[in-house]
Image (spheres, rainbow, N blue to C red):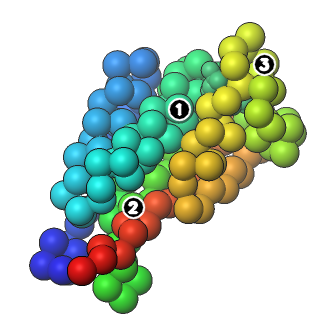
Amino acid sequence: MAEVSRLWLPVRIPIRDDTHAVVAAQQGRSLAAQLGFTLVEQTAFSTAILEIARNIVKYAGGGDITLQVVQDGDRAGIVVLACDEGPGIEDIELALKDGFSTGKSLGLGLPGAKRLMDVFEIASRPGHGTTVAMQKWKRPTSH
Ligand SMILES: Nc1ncnc2c1ncn2[C@@H]1O[C@H](COP(=O)(O)OP(=O)(O)OP(=O)(O)O)[C@@H](O)[C@H]1O
Ligand SMILES: [Mg+2]
């Protein structure tokens, strides 16, 4: 577990357009790979980041994403904090339903990201902004 016990500084990625969203997803994948997540876990993790980052671009016009490695005993995981100062989400429960979209899109980004992560929370103040906090643990490797 040498890779877990080192000090991991948070990585903050400003999100202004879709290319930044892709960068955030790639950084997330790379961090997950460094922690030993499987390829499937890496893909799930980066897909969730991409969806949340694309929402920041589309609905808030910008914000940032911070990735932080966390540890609980010998368990390692990654926390993602996605923050914006956009219009906020009026009804979070509704926004998390499959197919709900105010942007004439599929409405699968938030519920899809939630399914891909172990922890998923949204805090939002209409008129002030939105924070999505999500976390994924590395599955224990079998020997
Ligand atoms: N950061 C945000 N700020 C404000 N509203 C948001 C934000 N993220 C999501 N929403 C709202 O929640 C709704 C659902 O988001 P979700 O990502 O599930 O779907 P979508 O972006 O509309 O479509 P898709 O992601 O499938 O292309 C959005 O249509 C929007 O109204
Ligand atoms: Mg979306």
Which residue is found at the position 81% from the left and 43% from the top? 92
Horizontal placement of 7 versus 94: left or right? left
Residue carrying label 1: 51
Residue sticking out furthest to the left: 2
Dot 3 beta carbon under 8 Å from ligand 1: yes
Q: Is residue 50 visible?
A: yes
Secondary element at tag 1: helix
Q: Amino acid at mark 1?
A: Glu
Q: Amino acid at mark 3?
A: Thr
Residue carrying label 2: 78
**On screen, residue 129 above or below 81:** above
Residue carrying label 3: 102
Q: Are marks 2 and 1 in contact (CB under 8 Å)?
A: no
Q: Residues within 10 Å of mark 2 (few under 14, many from 20)?
A: many
In the rendering, at what x and y percent does residue 4 appear? Answer: 22, 75
In the rendering, at what x and y percent does residue 96 appear? Answer: 76, 41
